[in-house]
Amino acid sequence: MNMPLSRPDWQRDCLLASIKELVAYYQVSPSACLALQISRNYRLLLTQDDRVSIKTLWQSYARGWWDVYCRHRNLKQRTAFSFS
């Protein structure tokens, strides 16, 4: 018998696996593109869980990777990051 997948579980699991792979690539060859994609994936995770503590954690990771992206691009203004 096939069990239906819970909607957020498989999407969250795919995003987490993607982040893990991207971070591994970033460690081998750091780039702004990878940092931006990691940040975006963490932002996508915000839609996958209603727990405030988890959202806060993913939000902080997204902001951290956004800062890494800005450093790569030599962007002075890092306040452009918004969750709206």
Image (tube, rainbow, N blue to C red):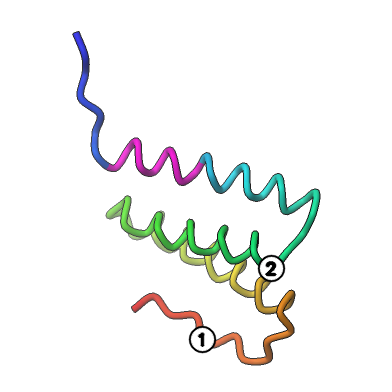
Can the viewer see residue 9 in this picture? yes
- Locate the C terminus by quadrant: bottom left
Examine the rendered structure and indicate whether residue 82 appears above or below residue 42: below
The image position of residue 59, as x and y in percent, is 46, 65
The image position of residue 52, as x and y in percent, is 34, 60
As drawn, which residue projects farthest toward the top?
Answer: 1
Residue type at mark 2: give it. Ala
The image position of residue 49, as x and y in percent, is 31, 51
Query: In the figure, residue 56 lies in which quadrant?
Result: bottom left
**Left or right, residue 72 beside residue 37:** right
Residue type at mark 1: give it. Ala
Residue ID for mark 2? 32
The image position of residue 40, as x and y in percent, is 49, 63
Query: In the figure, residue 71 lies in which quadrant?
Result: bottom right
Label 1 residue SS: loop
- Locate the N terminus by quadrant: top left
What residue appears at the point 20 percent right and 24 percent down from the top-left corner? 4
Q: Nearer the viewer, residue 56 or 68?
A: 68
Residue ID for mark 1? 80
Magenta region:
8-16
